[in-house]
Amino acid sequence: MSGPLAGILGGPPPPAPPRRSDLGRNLLATVALAVVLGMAARVIELRPLELVRDVGNIGIFLRGYLHPSFGNICEYSWQCVVTVCIALWGTLLAFFISVPLGLLGARNLSPHPVVYFAARRAMDVLRAVNEFVFALMFVTAVGLGPFAGMLALGIHTGGVLGKLLSETIESIDPGQAEGVTAVGASRLHVIAFGVVPQVLPNFLSYVLLRFESDIRSAAVIGMVGGGGIGFYLWDTIRSFKDGEAATVILLIVAMVMCTDVISARIRRAAI
Amino acid sequence: MSSTTSPVVVLERVGRRFGPQVALAGVTACIRPGEFVAIIGRSGAGKTTLLRCLSRAIVPTEGAVRMGGQDLRPLTGAALRTHRARVGVIYQQFNLVKRLRVLDNVLVGRLPHLRGWRRVAALARLFEYPQRYIALACLDHVGLLARTWQRTDTLSGGEQQRVAIAKILAQEPQLILGDEPVASLDVANGALIMETLRRIATAAGLTVISTLHHVEYARRYADRVLGLRAGHLVFDGPARDLDESAIREIFGSRPETGGPDVELAQLPEPVLVPS
């Protein structure tokens, strides 16, 4: 061999990378996954053959939905507006809940590990408890209606947004914040100058995404007395008014599509 | 600029460990007001650790750092912020807030000087005219007045470092620390930054302590050079004494030309020779 490589090659062979028995490990993992999935299938009574055999019944069920009745469309449309209003205020409430929780629950900003732990656990609770449960809770205080639904939605989404905010804060460029800390600025000034400009675009994007998801949640929260179109969805389906239910479902689909499009436009324009 | 005299900086057997690793050991030096001090040494020799002990970003594990007679170690809360306010730091990566306008980044330097409602208003990035005037004058001093309203990340590296200098000018520090301020800049921009620092320091009688990768920068701009090797101070003298044998003592061999000799090959981390 000649050329520049000649002097480099020919030394002792490089050490082989340490090898574990990947084959055995992968096989074991595959078998374990298969066993877990099999047991889970028994638990959920997975019977694909019955689905194939009786799939026609779904057609019979849906036949009633093919003829939407537009008699009450004004009332349903108004309830869609109510639903959007619930989501708007719910997202706003969530924003104000998430900012303090997110700041205190970010590891690199929290004043004390105990505060960090408490804020994290508080956000866990808000996220873990479904908005339906919160709605049932608030109904006892403020009665049936959109107000209870908005409170429930805001509290739950506050936990979700707080978690997203704290994760965003933890992933900021620490150098940019250090440049503010180094001049002797107070903690709040460091947040205002070093942290907010870095997290604002992402956080606003998260808020808008959650608004879209809040619309979908608000559309069903009426089932438990939270106001909005959800009550009629539940009521028409339960009383087998298939035509009415079809109208409600169509309206919900239209509403979700519209808000998603508008929200995506705002996100692109603002960020 | 106020004509404050810099405090005397005293390093008393300063040592710093990170776990079992000794980054700095027994560094003793006294830096007089108005000196321009360069800290040189290989990557991993403890330059940045020493500098971070001075800015009180970290606390030495042994010895003491005194500034104007004040021991920095016990500082917390408001006293620590007061210390940081009198020390202006410029960084290799500029550490400006990229999404803020240039003017806002310079105004960051004014934050420690605000009192009462002005502190609260600053949370919404509202500053009254005298503060903005100072910031604009500082920007003008580094020749970047035309960039005032631009987003900071639209500027080139050299321009961003000049914004960082305007920021610490606005901060009115008693001491300037540089953490490899020219390591990520080209030669022309590096020289411009060093000359600006030198000019500011001379005009206001400020002490400058800066780590520098290139021996040439230290020779040309520093009054005094501290050479670190594996955490130990192996050279302390005027820049003109930085001869071949001193360089060999600090770096093991000349960094620009030297191939890896036996001693360098034993260093724990890969040796990066600046080109």
Image: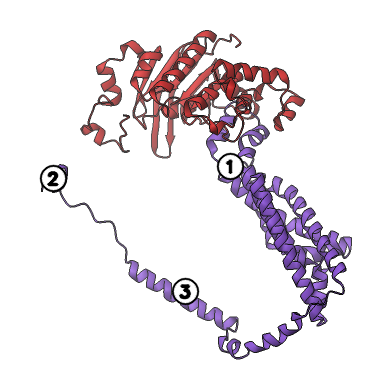
Chain colours: A purple, B red
User: Is B201 placed above or below A141 here?
Assistant: above
Which secondary structure lies at badge 3? helix
Which secondary structure lies at badge 2? helix
**Quick one: quadrant of the C terminus of chain B?**
top left
Q: Answer left or right for B53 relative to B172.
A: left
Residue A33: mark = 3
User: Is A66 placed above or below B212 here?
Assistant: below
Which of the two discs, 2 and 1, sits closer to the camera?
2
- Identify the amino acid type marked 3: Leu
Residue that appears at 60% across and 86% down: A51
User: Is B95 placed above or below A231 here?
Assistant: above
- Identify the amino acid type marked 1: Asn
Q: Chain of mark 1?
A: A
Q: Answer left or right for B32 relative to B141.
A: left
Residue that appears at 56% across and 42% down: A172
- Identify the amino acid type marked 2: Ala
Asked whether the viewer can see residue B65, the reply is: yes
Residue that appears at 59% across and 32% down: B151
Sequence-wise first label, 2 or 1:
2
Sequence-wise first label, 3 or 2:
2
